[in-house]
Image: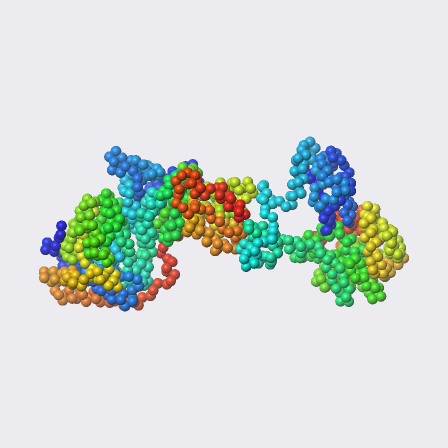
Amino acid sequence: MAVSAAGAVELDRDTLLSMYEKMTQIRTFEDLAGKNFAAGLVPGFVHLYAGEEAVAVGICTHLTDNDYITSTHRGHGHCIAKGVDIAGMVAELMGKSSGICKGKGGSMHIADVEKGMLGANGIVGGGIPLACGAALTAKTLGTGGVAVCFFGDGAANQGTFHEGLNLAAIWNLPVVFVCENNGYAESTPVRYHCAASDIANRAGAYEIPGVVVDGLDVFAVYEAAGEAIARARRGEGPSLLEAKTYRFYGHFQGDQVTYRTTDELDLYKQRDPIAALRKAIVDRGIASENELNAIDSRVTQQLDDAWAAAKAAPFPEPEEALTDVYVTY
Amino acid sequence: MPTIVTMPKWGLTMTSGTITNWSREEGDPVTEGVPLLTVETEKAVDDVEAPASGVLRKIVAAVGSEVPVMGAVAVITALGEDLSDEEVQALVTTRSGATAAAGGAAPRVAREGRQAARDTSGRVNASPAARKRAGELGIDLETVEATGPGGRITSEDVERAAETVAASAAAPRSEVVELADGTNIATLVAGPPEATGTIVFLHGLGGSQSTWGSVLGAFAETHRIVAVDLPGHGASDKPSPESTDYSVPGLAAKIGELLEKLELSPAVLIGHSLGGATALQLALDRPKLVRALALVDSAALGSEINSELLDRVESAPSRDEARLLLELFFENRRFVLERGIDDMHAARNAPGADDAVKAIAASAFTRYGQNLVLTDRLGELEAPVLIVWGELDRVIPSTHAVATLTALPTAWIEILEGVGHVPQVEAAPAFSTIVNRWLTSITRP
Amino acid sequence: MVAETATRTMTYQQAIHEALQIAMREDPTVVLLGEDIAGGAMVDHLVNDDAWGGPMGVTKGLVQEFGRNRVLDTPITEAGFIGAAVGAAATGLRPVAELMFVDFFGCCMDQIFDQGAKLRYMFGGKAKCPVTIRTQIGAGVSAAGQHSGCHYSVFTHMPGIKCVVPSTPADAKGLLLSAIRDDDLVMFFENKVLYGTKGEVLEGDEGIPLGVADVKREGDDVTIVAISRMVHQALAAADALSAEGIEAEVIDPRTLSPLDDETILSSVAKTHRLLIVDEDNPRCSAATDIAAIVADKGFDTLDAPIKRITAPHTPVPFSPPLEQFYVPSPDRIAEVVREIV
C-alpha cells in the first residue's frame, strides 16, 4: 500500500523547519564529503546518502535519545537525523582524535550510543540482529523505547534479514525494520538480485505488517513511520517499511556508476526530496524562501566550520591504536 | 639397620688401600671403636676401627685385596638383624654405585655423557640455556660432554663441566718456581683457588713434601696449600754447597722469595724439624710474610739434639742407613715400611742430595747441640704460634716445646702421647685435628 | 563478595548451573538466550517449566526461578540471537548466550567477530559489549566431525574477545561468574566430556579472575601447559612419570585471552623444558601461540625444543578407536616428556 504526500499530514512549523534543516544538513554534509574525499582529505571510503534524506529524517523525527537505530555503510544521513554531532562526524571522517569515535572507526563506523545511534555498519545486514537486541533490551527493561533498523535492498537477501524478522516476530520485539530500496545493491539492480518485486511483501512470510512507502516524500515516510513506531511502542510488535528511494551518487565515491544512465539520474533529481519539502513549506505559507535560504546559509556555515576545525585538529597519537579494545584486560 | 664398612680416605692423594689383616671373622661380634681391619697404603699402615657394634655379617674384601677409597669392605648387622645373602649383595652393589646416583626415591635413568653433536656449520649443539650459562661461567662449549637428546649440551652439562673445572683447579698438582738465582723450587699445590688462606708446609732434614701426605687432604678442602721441597731435597734443585747458602737463614731467605713469587703472603707456615727452624727464622726476619706459625718437633727451640741423627747424616747413604734413620724418627715401628725405606734411600742418593743434607747439617748442628737457637727471639713474634710435639721424639726432646711457654705465653702447645719425631705421619688424624682447631681459632675475629 | 572456604562436591555441569543462578539472582539485567535452554517454549503445559533445560541439562531449573522473559529459548538462528545478544549488551542488558556447539560458529561469526568484538574499539571506547557466549567443545563422545571441535584458537586470535577454558568444576563456577560480570565479550568454552566430572567447589559467589593460570601440579623436571580437559590427561601422565623419577609441573592457563604467560615463563625458567597439550588441531593453535611466546621470552631458559601435543590436522573422526587416537592421551604425553628430559 503506498502513501503519498497528498494525504496531508499536519506538522507544526517548528517540526517542518527542523526537518528541512536536518535534510539540508545531510545534503550539504554529503556534498562536502564527496568533494573533500576527491581532494584526498578523507582516507578510505565514503558512501553518500544524498537523495535519500527523506527516509532518515521522516523516521527519526519520531525518535528520542531513548530509542535506538542501527544503520549501514551509508550511515551519515542516519547519524545526522538521529542527532549525532556533525563536527564530530567530520573529524571522524578525517581520522582525527576529535572525531566522534576518536578516529578509530571512520565513515563506516560512526556511532554515538548515548544518542541511541548503534553505529554505521560495514557488514551488509550486520545491524539487523543488533537492532533486535536493542529492542530486546527495551522490552526486557521496560524502557518504552523502540529500535529502528535501517538497511538496503541488498541486505534484504542476507540471512540476517530473515533471522532478524523471524526473531522479532516471535518475540514481539518493538522494532521497525526499514528497507531503503534505492534500486541497486552496489552495481546490481534490484530487479535482478531480489526475488520479491516489493521487499515489503516479505513481511508476510513472518506475518508482520509490511508497507511500501515513497521514500522521496518526507511526509509519506513520516506518516508510515509514525504508525509503525506507535505500534511498536504499544507492544504490538515489529513492522517492515520499504521506502523506495534513490541515491544521487554512486555506491561509493569513485564509483563510475556505469550501471545507471544519466537520464535516470536526471529523472530522480527532478524529484529531489529537499526541493519538494521546500516547495511544500513555501506553498503552504509556513515559511518564506528567504527564511529557508537563511537556514541554507547557516547549514553551509556550520559545515564549513566543521571542516575547517577538522582540518586543523591533530591526528591521534600512534599509541592510541592500543587502547579501547577491552574495558579491562 | 646394617652398616657398611668402607675404605677410609687418608691423605690427599690416597685413592685406594690394601687390606692386610682382618682381626675378626664373619659371624663374630664387633664393638664400635675397636680395630677391625688393617689397611696399608703407599704412605702408611693403620688400623680401621669398626664404625658400629653388632655382628660382622660379611667380609666383602679379603686380605690382600685393594679397595678404592669409599668402597665397601664389610657389612655389620645389628644383633638379631637378619639379612639374606641377596640383600647383603644388593647393599654392597648399591653402595658402590651410590656415588653416581641422583637423590630421590626413584633414580632417573640418566643419559651417558658423550661428545656433543654438531650442526651443519660445525657449531656444537647446545641448548639456549646451555649457551647462556656457558657464557656466564666462562666454559668453552667445545670441552663439554653432552647428555641431552640428540647429542645436545644442556645447562646441566655446563654446570657439571664448571664443577669439574673448579675441582681440577683444586686438585693437587706440581708447580715449579724459579728463584732469582735460578734455583728451581718444586712445590705441590692444591685447594680451591678462591680460598682465602694459604698454608705453606716445610719438611725436615732429608725429607720432602711427601712427609705431609697424610694430612694435606684435610686442609686442601678449605685452604690453598703449598707443600715445598726445600733446596737440596725432593724434586727441587740441589745446587752445590759452594754456590749456595744452606744455612737456616739462607734457606729462610729462599722460602721468603718463594712466598713473594707465589704472591702468597701472608701465609700460615707449618714447619717440621729443620723446616720448623726455617719457618721460625723467616717469621723473625720477614714478619709481614707470615700470618701464623706452627712448629712441629722443630729445631732451633733448644740446644739439644740426638747425636745419632748426626751419625746417620754423616754416614754414606746406604739402605741400612735409611732404615736406621726412619727407626730413629718413628716410635711405632709399623711406620718403618720397606717401601718407605726404599724411597728414603733413593732420595738420599739423588744427585746432589747427600751433599746438600750434609751441608745443612753441618751448618745447623754440632755433636754438642744445635748451632742455631732462637728461643731468646721468640718474644719478637707477633703472629699466633702453635707448637706440636711427639712425646717420645728421640731426635729433639719434647721439653723444647714446653720451654717456649716462657717466651710465648699465648702459644698453643700440644704434646702427642706415644708419638715420635714425625707426628704428621705417625698420628695424622690427631695432628690434623689439632692444626684445624688452631686455624679456626686464629681466623675467628 | 564474601570470601568462602567451605566446599561441596559437585559436577562441572552443576557448577556452571550454580554460577548462572548466582549471576541471575544478583543482576536483573542478566538474561539467557539459546536453543532449548529451557525447551518446550509455548507448550501449554510447560509455561514456566522446562522440557530440556539445555541439551546437556546445564540450564535446567532456571526458567522455573526466573521465567521465560529471562530464560529465552531461541529458534535455530545463530546469527539472529547471537547478534541480538550483542545488540542487547550494547544497550543495557548483560546477556549470556549459548552457542550450542562451537563448531556452529560459522553461522554467527560476523556477530561475534565483526560486531561484538570490534564495537567498543571502532566507537572510540564509547560503547561496551558485556556479553558472555557459552559453548561446548571437545571430542570423546562420538559426536563426530561437526560437534566435537575446540577452535578456541580462532577466538583467542581476535582482539576484543576473551577466552575462558575451565578444566574443573571449581574453576568453571568461579570463571563463569567473572565472565558474566566482565564488561567485555567473553567466550566460555565448556568441554562436554567434563560435564560429569566431580570436584570440590567453593560455596559463595566469589569469582576467579580472568587471566590467572593455575599450577595444578608442581614439579622440577618439565613444564606441561595443558588446556581444558587436557589438564587431566597431563596429570595422569605426570603420575606415571613420577614413578620413573620425572616430576612434571602441570599448568592450567584457565584463560587463553588474556594469557598468564608470566606463570608459564617462571615455570620454564625452573624446569628448562616445555610441553603444551592442546586438543585442538595443530596449525595456528593455542599451543603454537604459547610455544612462540616462550621461544621468544624464555629462549635462554630452554634446554630442549618446545613440544606441542595436539590433535592431528584432521576433522574429528567418528569411530571410537579413531577418536581415541585423535585426542592426546596420557601415554603420548609421557612419551614426549621422556624424549626431552
Q: Quadrant of the N terminus of chain C?
A: top left
Residue B174 x, y percent position in the rendering: 73, 57
Q: Residue at x 52, y 49 (%)?
A: C273
Residue B198 x, y percent position in the rendering: 70, 57
Q: Quadrant of residue B189?
A: bottom right
Q: Nearer the viewer, residue C337 or C298?
A: C337
The residue furthest top is B80
Residue B215 x, y percent position in the rendering: 74, 51
Q: Residue at x 40, y 37 (%)?
A: C196
Question: Residue B212, relative to residue C316: is it above or below?
Answer: below
Q: Residue at x 49, y 46 (%)?
A: C224
**In this picture, residue A127 sits left or right of residue B188:** left
Question: Residue B260, relative to residue B43: is it above or below?
Answer: below
Colour basis = rainbow
Q: Nearer the viewer, residue A36 or B228?
A: A36
Say whether residue B54 is visible: no
Say whether residue B423 is visible: yes
Q: Nearer the viewer, residue B271 or B64?
A: B64
The residue furthest front is B120
Q: Residue at x 27, y 65 (%)?
A: A37
Q: How many marks?
A: 0
Residue A174 x, y percent position in the rendering: 22, 47
